[in-house]
Amino acid sequence: MIKIWVEVFWKDHPEKNWKISVSKNNKRLLPVNLLAFFAILLGIAGGPLFDICLRAGEQLTDSSGYIQAVLGENP
């Protein structure tokens, strides 16, 4: 790791006049922006989303409601 650090950060760059090129292609930024939006949304609306997921999990583990809805019988 020290060798990499020395080669990358402490050595002089071979070309003194190099420039970093930045792409202005906004299509590549769309996934990053979507992930950032959903991360912020999850931080703001975490409680209601947790309640929805909890109810879905309870319905998945309790099959009595499904049996009653499909067969019309009480388990």
Image (tube, rainbow, N blue to C red):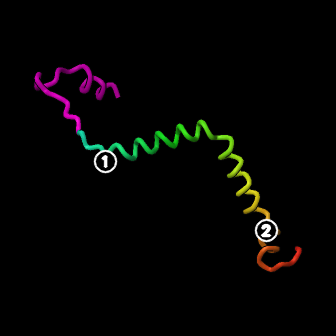
Specify the label residue 63 is tagged with.
2
- Give yes or no for contact between labels 1 and 2 (Cβ–Cβ under 8 Å): no
Mark with earlier residue (1, 2): 1
Q: Residue at x 46, y 43 (%)?
A: 35
* Number of numbered discs on residues: 2
Residue at position x 89%, y 74% in the image: 74
The part of the chain drawn in magenta is 1-23
Identify the secondary structure beneath mark 1.
helix
Q: Residues within 10 Å of mark 2 (few under 14, many from 20)?
A: few
Q: Residue at 60% of width from left, 36% of height from top?
A: 44
Where, by quadrant of the figure, is residue 43 drawn?
top right
Could you tell me the amino acid type at mark 2?
Ser
Q: Is residue 41 left or right of residue 9?
A: right
Q: Which mark is residue 42?
A: none
Mark 1 vs mark 2: give the one in front. Answer: 1
Residue under label 1: 27
Relative to 15, is 31 on the left or the right?
right
Residue 55 at x, y = what percent? 74, 54
User: In this rendering, is residue 6 above or below 59?
Assistant: above
Residue beneath the point at 76% across and 57% down: 58
Q: CA distance from mark 1 to mark 2?
A: 44 Å
Looking at the rendered structure, the kind of residue marked 1 is Lys
Decide whether the magenta segment is chiefly helix, strand or loop: loop
Q: Position of residue 49 (x, y in %)?
A: 65, 46
